[in-house]
Image (cartoon, helix red, strand yellow):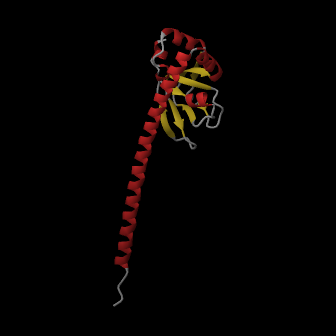
């Protein structure tokens, strides 16, 4: 109960609300290296990482983000009905709480206060993710501009060297 009540997606939940959540979830273990979600799959569940480490990976397997305990995964698709937008990989043996879309939705529809709290919490979580993504994008843009400047300087230096190497015809 304490673990769930400390999770950002369920922040502000009372004991009865947490107990209601516990009735509609399953505890699951994931093995290191296991694909948890694949981009394009149906979003019929979300999970909350209790222990271990998950990774958001790109098309070629590169890590885009790290998911630490207490963080929800897959909640966007559960609430929007859209397919998975990313690949999720278990980096370490991990323990998660899984919420099926149907059961969680039924619970939230019967308790409007819980529904409102979850939605408010998700707005906060997604807003934070957007801020983090914007910072990463800005950082990558700065790196790209720096690389472009360096490349331009190298090209200019090479042109000067070529001009110096050409004998003058006088």
For residue 20, which quarter of the picture? top right
Please provide percent x and percent y for residue 100. Answer: 63, 21
Camera-side residue of 136 and 9: 9
Please provide percent x and percent y for residue 23. Answer: 59, 11
On screen, residue 160 above or below 65? below
- The residue depicted at 56 percent of the width and 31 percent of the height is 76
Please provide percent x and percent y for residue 136. Answer: 43, 42
Camera-side residue of 27 and 108: 108
For residue 22, which quarter of the picture? top right
Visible residue check, residue 52: no
- The residue depicted at 46 percent of the width and 39 percent of the height is 133
- The residue depicted at 41 percent of the width and 58 percent of the height is 148
Q: Residue furthest front?
A: 112
- The residue depicted at 49 percent of the width and 16 percent of the height is 4
Quadrant (top left/top right/bottom left/bottom right) for the C terminus: bottom left
156 left or right of 41 in image? left
On screen, residue 61 above or below 53? below
């Amino acid at each position: 109960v304490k673990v769930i009540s400390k999770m950002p997606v369920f922040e502000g939940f009372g004991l009865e609300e947490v107990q209601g959540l516990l009735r509609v979830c399953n505890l699951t273990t994931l093995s290191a290296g296991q694909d948890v979600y694949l981009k394009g799959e149906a979003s019929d569940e979300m999970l909350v990482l209790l222990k271990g480490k998950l990774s958001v990976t790109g098309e070629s397997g590169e890590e885009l983000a790290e998911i630490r305990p207490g963080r929800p995964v897959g909640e966007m698709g559960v609430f929007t009905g859209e397919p998975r937008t990313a690949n999720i990989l278990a980096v370490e043996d991990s323990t998660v709480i899984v919420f099926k879309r149907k059961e969680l939705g039924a619970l939230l529809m019967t308790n409007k206060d819980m529904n409102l709290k979850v939605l408010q919490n998700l707005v906060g979580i997604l807003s934070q993710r957007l801020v983090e993504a914007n910072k990463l994008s800005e950082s990558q843009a700065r790196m790209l501009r720096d690389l472009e400047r360096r490349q331009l300087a190298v090209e200019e230096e090479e042109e000067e060297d070529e001009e110096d190497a050409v004998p003058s015809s006088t």
